[in-house]
Image (cartoon, rainbow, N blue to C red):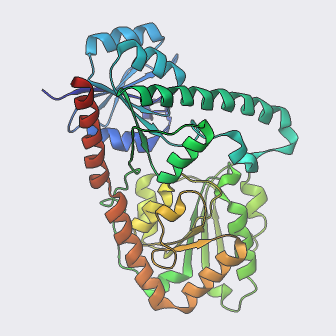
């Protein structure tokens, strides 16, 4: 009999109500369901139980119903993405069973790390966020201390940078943890050998709802490149939506070689788009991994990104992409690739090979299964 697992995630996707949620959690769940008896659980006042691509999802109106189900189902372990206080109190502590908690960032780092999102016109809103965030980090510290005293909780970080930040902001040292990347579907984002022509086509695929994605740096780099004699030969295709879309794209929309697409794309559309481009422009102010960047690398696009947060763990500067610190360096690296087609072609191959070796979903799921089985075994003795 396969071990039973309850996976807790409040933002699990629900196509019935067109809720995209956390698609990367669903990608992992589909693979885990091949090896375990898996059920997704979340609390919701508006959703009912549903099935999404053969993954069962249970929606509970209240915590009492969740506890009744958990007792009857009798799971061997909880897997949790974006752990909330109720999951700790009414799940782990209530049933005294192990938990593998994935740490993605927002639930574990302090507000001062994201001052770049501060809106001067909404200071009151940011102050409320500071208070909420302080309690969130305090609760996370309690879970870490609980984990350090017993074998019930094991943490999984998508990058070592995320672990270090969590330890720094919670003033703790974490004993029970693993580094497990978000898996990249290398069968979907398949490598297609690039030609020298692809180095002239640059893709930007970002949310414009947060300053963390540094779209302002991308636009500034395009303006700097516009002064170069080869600029008209380049193409920039920008896909995205968000509150900053108009403000940021207004700066470069007058260029005939800049193509604006104010919409989001699904995975199938993105992988189809990848084959037409050679450079993925994706600076960032904060990323625990940079999943869209890794997907582009898997397809053979060369990332021009930032020497920031977790990014250096996934991009080797000058080998599989370029790490930059400002718009001037971004423009210089795109110019370097334009002037050196052979360098571009080699970096394209390196990018795809490195991501397959480091974060291919088949590799990641094997690591996750091993950790799950070890967590169960540790508490069985």
User: 179 or 173, which is in the foreground?
Assistant: 173
Residue visible at 72% across and 77% down?
328
The answer to whether residue 67 is above or below residue 49 is above
* Residue 371 locus on image (x, y percent): 29, 40
Task: Report whether 220 appears left or right of 97.
Answer: right
Residue visible at 60% across and 81% down?
334
User: 71 or 161, which is in the foreground?
Assistant: 161
Q: Quadrant of the C terminus?
A: top left
Residue visible at 46% across and 21% down?
87
* Residue 187 locus on image (x, y percent): 29, 60
Residue visible at 49% across and 90% down?
341
* Residue 266 locus on image (x, y percent): 46, 51
Task: Report whether 347 appears left or right of 262.
Answer: left
Can you tell which quarter of the image residue 36 is in?
top left
The answer to whether residue 323 is above or below residue 285 is below
**Res. 72 visible in picture:** yes
User: 352 or 260, which is in the foreground?
Assistant: 352
Task: Report whether 337 appears left or right of 135.
Answer: left
* Residue 298 locus on image (x, y percent): 39, 66
Task: Report whether 204 appears left or right of 6.
Answer: right
């Amino acid at each position: 009999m396969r071990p039973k697992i309850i996976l807790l995630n409040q933002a699990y996707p629900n196509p019935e109500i067109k809720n995209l949620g956390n698609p990367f959690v669903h990608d992992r769940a589909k693979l885990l369901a091949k090896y375990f008896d898996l059920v997704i659980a979340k609390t919701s006042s508006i959703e009912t139980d549903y099935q999404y691509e053969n993954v069962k999802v249970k929606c509970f109106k209240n915590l009492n119903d969740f506890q009744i189900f958990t007792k009857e189902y009798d799971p061997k372990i909880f897997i949790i993405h974006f752990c909330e206080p109720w999951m700790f109190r009414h799940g782990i502590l209530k049933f005294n069973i192990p938990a593998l908690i994935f740490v993605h960032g927002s639930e574990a780092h302090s507000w001062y790390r994201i001052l770049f999102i501060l809106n001067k016109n909404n200071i009151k809103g940011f102050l409320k966020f500071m208070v909420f965030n302080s309690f969130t980090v305090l609760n996370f510290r309690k879970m870490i201390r609980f984990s350090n005293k017993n074998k019930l909780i094991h943490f999984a970080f998508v990058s070592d940078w995320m672990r270090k930040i969590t330890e720094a902001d919670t003033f703790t040292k974490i004993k029970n943890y693993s580094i497990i990347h978000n898996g990249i579907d290398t069968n979907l984002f398949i490598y297609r050998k690039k030609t020298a022509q692809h180095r002239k086509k640059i893709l930007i695929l970002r949310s414009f709802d947060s300053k963390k994605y540094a779209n302002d740096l991308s636009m500034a780099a395009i303006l700097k490149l516009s002064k170069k004699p080869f600029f008209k030969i380049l193409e920039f295709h920008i896909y995205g939506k968000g509150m900053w879309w108009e403000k940021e794209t207004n700066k470069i929309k007058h260029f005939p070689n800049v193509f604006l697409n104010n919409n989001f794309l699904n995975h199938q559309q993105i992988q189809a788009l990848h084959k037409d481009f050679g450079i993925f422009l994706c600076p960032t102010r904060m990323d625990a991994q940079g999943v869209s960047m890794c997907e582009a690398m898997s397809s053979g696009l060369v990332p021009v990104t930032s020497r920031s947060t977790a990014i250096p763990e996934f991009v080797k500067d000058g080998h599989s992409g370029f790490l930059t610190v400002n718009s001037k360096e971004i423009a210089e690296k795109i110019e370097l690739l334009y002037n050196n087609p052979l360098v571009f072609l080699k970096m394209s191959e390196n990018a795809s090979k490195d991501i397959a070796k480091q974060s291919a979903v088949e590799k990641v799921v094997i690591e996750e299964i091993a950790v799950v089985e070890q967590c169960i075994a540790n508490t069985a003795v």
